[in-house]
Image (cartoon, rainbow, N blue to C red):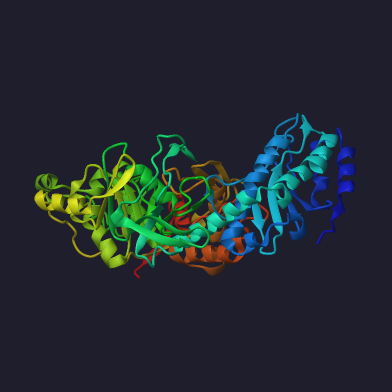
Amino acid sequence: MEESRPREALMRMLEGMEGKGYGAYKAIQGPWSFPSFGLQVDHVQGDPFAAPSRLRVFLPPEVAGLPGDLLLSPSRRVGTACFLARRFRSVARDLGGSDGSGRSGEIRMEAPGQEVLPISALRVDPDGAVEARFTVGLPARGRRVLGKTAARLLGDVLPQVVAQSLVSQALDLGALRLHAESNEDADALRDQLRDRGLLAFVSDGASLPRQSGVDEAPMLGDQVVPFQSPPSLRVTLEAPNAGAISGMGLPRGVILVVGGGYHGKSTLLRALERGVYNHRPGDGRERVVTDPAAVKVRAEDGRSVVGVDISPFIGNLPGGEDTRAFSTPFASGSTSQAAAIMEALEAGATTLLVDEDTAATNFMIRDRRMQALVPREEEPIIPFIDRVRELHEEHDVSSVLVLGGSGDYLDVADTVVAMVGYRPVDVTPRAREVAAAHPTGRIPESPGPMAPAPRRFPRRESLDPSRGRRATRVRVRDAQGIQFGEEEIDLSAVDQVLSRAQLRALSEGLILMRRHFLDRRGRLDVTELLDGVMELMETEGLDALGRGDEGDLAAFRRLELAAALNRLRSLEMDGTEAH
């Protein structure tokens, strides 16, 4: 291990670089010893306009001084880490910045948004040691080093950022403790769902509306209606810190969410789809928790599908095309939604979330009049309505469906919740009365039980991250997609992907899938590959991905990793096998 050099040596080195070419900064790579923390310069940018330099700081437990009760569980440590990351980013934004080229003087950390989940930017160890990973734009004028400015930045500004954001004496310990305890409570609430026969829980008093469709911050003001459970669905769960919490428990099965337009149906579904993650205190959804294997599925015109058995929903297509191993570079709305469901089941989904606004109508329902007009033998689609009960009763897969115009689903629902002015009302008894009084005469169209989908075996060569002469070329351009080698993976329709940091981690997960499993272990099916990546991350954390020093990664579920794999247009399958 390289020996640490003292802070004073770093200051002299930087001041002596004044006016030299930008490449002179390479000399500062390596470990440095500051009075209260260690500094590691992992990578120095080659140009002031390139991606900024990557640094880490290490605080021993006695310097960080975090109270011992914040370290007692992984949940508390994750909540603490996310609080510290947000604080570091805020302080760095206030103190950093200077004149110069490119991002000169910028100190930046990839901190989480409203959600709370493991991040690589900041780690809190069980003993209270803290590691922070961030980037710095090393100052330059043109392509000449501003050495004295750099010395002030790393020698004076950075220690201030560390002291004000990572040392307990400078923190609001009440707010910090609230973050740790709130995160632990959310995990405890979610852990109770399965034993209580629930797929989700929404606490009384929760605030579900968001600022906008692109802003996950809570809506504020008198117009926000606090959530209040219908008495018939109210349950009480126990949280280790907050104690007894009452709210709406959605039972497993087939759940319909109905109501007029703009009354909160999609807002509730949005909270449920994000309820697979924890949320920061003050978000309004910090006590909204959902089955951790819940997946939002939707139609996605134009996506690629590779070797997916969609025959439970789509029979043989005109021309005799077999749908037991269906592939297309441009799926239709119905075939894409069928593929999304089958891929989700392959990845281990136990709850499906569907909003009719983003679903293919002909996939969801074929009413009695259309059945009379178009004979069954001329329609290859088996509508979701004819599989939804089988999914629950035979495969233990629940569904939550937001519906405004498909009353036929009243015949197959276990629970019906109406949203009226953003307040939920249990209308299950009334829905059954309506269904009995107004029979549709619709004829179920399922041709038989769903058979287990065949195993799919991705071909190693089709997971190729290379581009040109570069063996690995992976970039996240925005919060919606990944450039993976020569291919673009479009994840804009995968609603449970949160951020650029999660996309970065997913891209590294695909690389890990190829290098660690397909290269070393040969022919593995999709489920085995997902198992391997997630088990390695469970053991090694986010450092299982990439080089092990990145600070821009956020944890993902196996379901999002499967979604990224299945949307890789170069993906090919090395055959399939029956289970």
Can residue 301 be seen in this snapshot?
A: no
Judged left or right of residue 24, residue 192 is left
- Where is residue 201, by image quadrant? bottom left
Question: Percent from the top left, x then y, of residue 458?
Answer: 45, 60
Percent position of residue 250, x then y? 33, 57
Q: How many marks?
A: 0
Q: Position of residue 504 (x, y in %)?
A: 57, 49
User: In this view of the protein, which residue sits in the foreground, 192 or 439?
Assistant: 192
Q: Is residue 75 visible?
A: yes
The image quadrant where one finds the N terminus is: bottom right
372 to 446, vertically: above or below: above
Q: Quadrant of residue 157?
A: top right
Q: Is residue 23 left or right of residue 83?
A: right
479 vs 350: above or below: above
Give 536 or 416, whichever is nearer the viewer. 416
Q: Quadrant of the C terminus?
A: bottom left
* Residue name at image x 85 percent, y 58 percent: 3
Q: Position of residue 238 (x, y in %)?
A: 45, 62
Relative horizontal placement of residue 456, taking residue 51 as reference (left or right): left
Residue depicted at x 73% and y 30%: 101
Pick whichever, 205 or 373, lies toward us. 205
